[in-house]
Image (cartoon, rainbow, N blue to C red):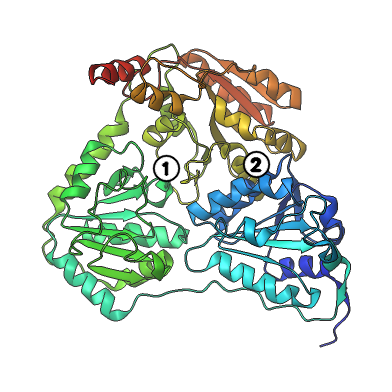
Amino acid sequence: MTLKSRTGGQLIVDQLLVHGVTDVFCVPGESYLAVLDALHDADVRITICRQEAGASIAAEAVGKLTGKPGICMVTRGPGATNAAHGIHVAMQDSTPLIMFVGQIETGMRERDAFQELDYRKVFSGLAKWATEIDDPARIPELISRAFHVAASGRPGPVVIALPEDMLVAAAMVPDAPPFRQVETHPGLTAMAELQKRLWAAERPIVLVGGSRWSDKAVERMIRFAERFDLPVATTFRRQALFPATHANYAGDGGLGMSAGLSKAIKEADLVLCIGDQLSEASTQSYTLLDIPGDGKRLIHVHPDPQELNRTYATALPINASPEAFTAAVEGLQPPNAIRWREWTRAINQNAVAQSAQPTRSPGDLQMSEVVIWLRNHLPEDAIITNGAGNYAIWLHRFYHFRKFGTQLAPTSGSMGYGVPAAVAAKRVLPEKQVVSFAGDGCFLMNGQEFATAVQHDLPMVIIVVDNGMYGTIRMHQERAYPGRVSATGLRNPDFAAYARAFGGHGETVRRTEEFAPAFLRCEASGKPAIIHCIVDSEAITPGKALSDIRKEAIAQGR
């Protein structure tokens, strides 16, 4: 093999190509010009974002969609701190992500140079690994390690700082081989014990969540559920891991889970959790399972051994990825007589009832009817994105996710996620229909990425649900301090005009019957589009008005 001298900037781009990277999301900066120059001639698609949070979230969304590290590049100092938004999402959501951030020259360290930060310290508690290049000859080694760290075990974000002088310095060094995700397979003994415990169960339930799933893993999970007639619930914002239209679907086990599903999890004598960490959002603030518990009913499957027995004592901890575990369960045999069939049917009937009929909320625009129309209109492989806010309750309850890879939503509860995630989805999967939900507060946190959608000609529909407030905070405010409204009211722009100002399509909807024609016009426009949905401020959840929450709090003496 003949080696040639390459600059650090060229080495970085060459390693991205070695590891199969096709897309980079960035906000340019003078601190990494040598990398941008190397990208000029590379077969890598660059998406130019308008703010670093948008770039890091878009890269995180690619990690969710592909299972491979999404790539973002940002400049030093404020660029990196802006991008911390997506790093936090990736860490909490177990998403593979690599962020390259520009850095001062090595000879200027510890002088408070322009936009200087110590990235190892800044991201030490926020990323899975943070490092800095000190020798261009080590670039292939460090980037290979970054891909393996980001994608293996419990996936997460890696931050690599790029000193300017390291990007122009040259080295003669070979490329690393393409990364291979480290797989963890369940042992034969563990699978034999799982079958034994399933045969002994009377009221089993399965919870699926986390990352490291695939189309094939979901298909195998469905077959497993069918052969054993198991009820399967999805955890918070992981609804695309099991079809909501399936007879074994047990419901959405996230925030606002139904009383029936909560009761079933508490009463189950065997809880098989696959992939999820059983976090606060998936356990109703850690109330569904005892901590640490008696270790008799929980079987926990996770690719990272540090997550097993971390919070809950398990009857059977299985260190395996969902991909490997679902392959292994293909060899399990169901009992001759399945005792829990009626249990499964009852749980499924409860799940079906939750979304079968629209609920009535105050005002002329009914979001439950809007979401039900969308679930009947959109193809089953349409990708739906959202950020954080009470508006998402209608989406999670009434939309039926039926295919893997169709939901992009932050389990970290991060506002501002939906728009850049939609940009990423349409950029890497242009054949898919993409719809994003955002609240009025949520949208304006990263709504500038609508300009990115226009620039790169990415037709999508963004539904902005405008109730004139930070609704979730207002809801909690009324519960804790009824009638004492503080810092939650918003005066909003005309979001349809906002869309048109950027060169997109805009619609305003005030009544339920106006939504479908507006959506169809958005689709026909062939442009990025915004539907400004103006809803009554009283419509805070599908089941309660804001004034009902206030009255209940007052009655309880708060």
Q: Residue at x 69, y 18 (%)?
A: 497
Q: In this rendering, does residue 460 appear at all?
A: no
Residue 19 against residue 83 in the figure, above or below: below
Residue 113 against residue 510 in the figure, above or below: below
What's the amino acid at mark 1? Phe
The residue tagged 1 is 401
Residue that protrudes farthest toward the front in the picture: 111
Q: Residue at x 74, y 49 (%)?
A: 77
Return the disc, 1 or 2, that comes first in the chain's sequence: 1
Distance of mark 1 from mark 2, alpha carbons? 20 Å
Looking at the picture, how far across and down is residue 465, in whole percent?
Answer: 52, 24
Closer to the eye: label 1 or 2: 2
Q: In this rendering, does residue 381 appear at all?
A: yes
Q: Residues within 10 Å of mark 2 (few under 14, many from 20)?
A: many
Q: Residue at x 74, y 69 (%)?
A: 133
**Screen quadrant of the N terminus:** bottom right
Residue 258 against residue 124 in the figure, above or below: above
The residue tagged 2 is 423
- Give the label on residue 434, or none: none
On the picture, is 426 further left or further right than 478?
A: right
Looking at the picture, how far across and down is residue 98, in whole percent?
Answer: 64, 60
Residue situated in front as seen by the camera: 253 or 130: 130
**Screen quadrant of the C terminus:** top left
Residue 120 against residue 547 in the figure, above or below: below
What's the amino acid at mark 2? Val
Q: How many marks?
A: 2
Q: Secondary structure at mark 2?
A: helix
